[in-house]
Image: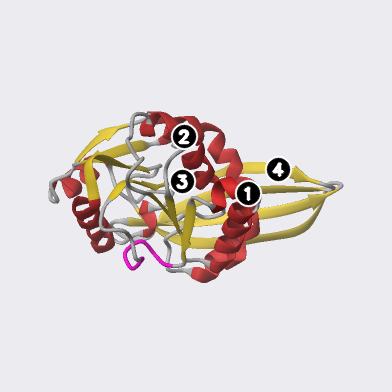
Amino acid sequence: MSESTGGYFYDRIAEYVAVLLPCAWVGLRPALVAALAGLDATARPVVDVGAGTGDGVVVLADALPEVEIIAVEPHAALRTALLTRISSTSALSERVTVLADDVLSARLPDRIAGLTAMNVIGHLAPGERRALWALLAAKLIPGGRAVLNLYPPHLPEAVPDAPMGAAVIGRRRYSGSAAAEPAGPDSVTWHMTYRVEEEGEVVAEFTASDHWYVLTPAELATEVAEHGLRVRAGDAAQGLHIITR
């Protein structure tokens, strides 16, 4: 879930990602399963880019029960949670390889059946995005596909503060909210505020900021077409887009 080069950002928020991200996967999980339906991944692996704490890895493993999965996660704090989740069950540890790299420097197989990138593309600068499309053009097998999501804003505009989710663990309630402001002609800065409460008292609170490159669906279509790829819309509510050769 994170291809950002800002390792410090994810070092600060990793525990909150682990607790709050499952809220987002309530809707994202069935949408991704539908986008992967019919994919023949029995002979080639599927790559999960920015695998984070492993929510997407579990979805892939359940949706494609025969697939080998390569989970790419460059940030150590998230990768620790990812490896803990994978190593806790042989069903995952026998099928999932974890790479401590970003997707453009990772040692990936020559050919892959698919690639997923949930909540990742905005971390890639325009040149890095195009390098990813070139990678897909070179490695996707015929009939393979990549699935990614684009969530608002698609243009460099302000987004008012809104809740990201909440979870209760023991005596404590964890919650988060996010707001964005323009940061240039093709990007925004997200400000995420995280809070921990116990018996109504705030015991911890801080805000972390992250740079995010925005992209419209039309721009996505134009960029991938430059590499001989096509894109079609998936679940609109989850902002899914499916890229094929």
Is 127 drawn above or below residue 242 in the view shown? below
* Circle nearer the viewer, 3 or 1: 1
The residue segment tinted magenta is: 101-106
Q: Amino acid at mark 4?
A: Ala
Q: Which residue is mark 4?
A: 167
Instruction: Tell me the distance, in whole angstroms, between the alpha carbons under discs 2 and 4.
Output: 26 Å
Q: Amino acid at mark 3?
A: Val
Q: Quadrant of the C terminus?
A: top left
Q: Tell me what residue is drawn at x 34 percent, y 66 percent.
A: 107
Q: Main secondary structure of the magenta part?
A: loop
Mark 4, secondary structure of its residue = strand
Instruction: Tell me the distance, in whole angstroms, between the alpha carbons under discs 3 and 1.
Output: 40 Å
Q: Which residue is mark 3?
A: 159
Q: Which residue is mark 1?
A: 89
Instruction: Tell me the distance, in whole angstroms, between the alpha carbons under discs 4 and 1.
Output: 24 Å
Instruction: Tell me the distance, in whole angstroms, between the alpha carbons under discs 4 and 3.
Output: 23 Å
Marked residue nearer the N-terminal end (2 or 4):
2
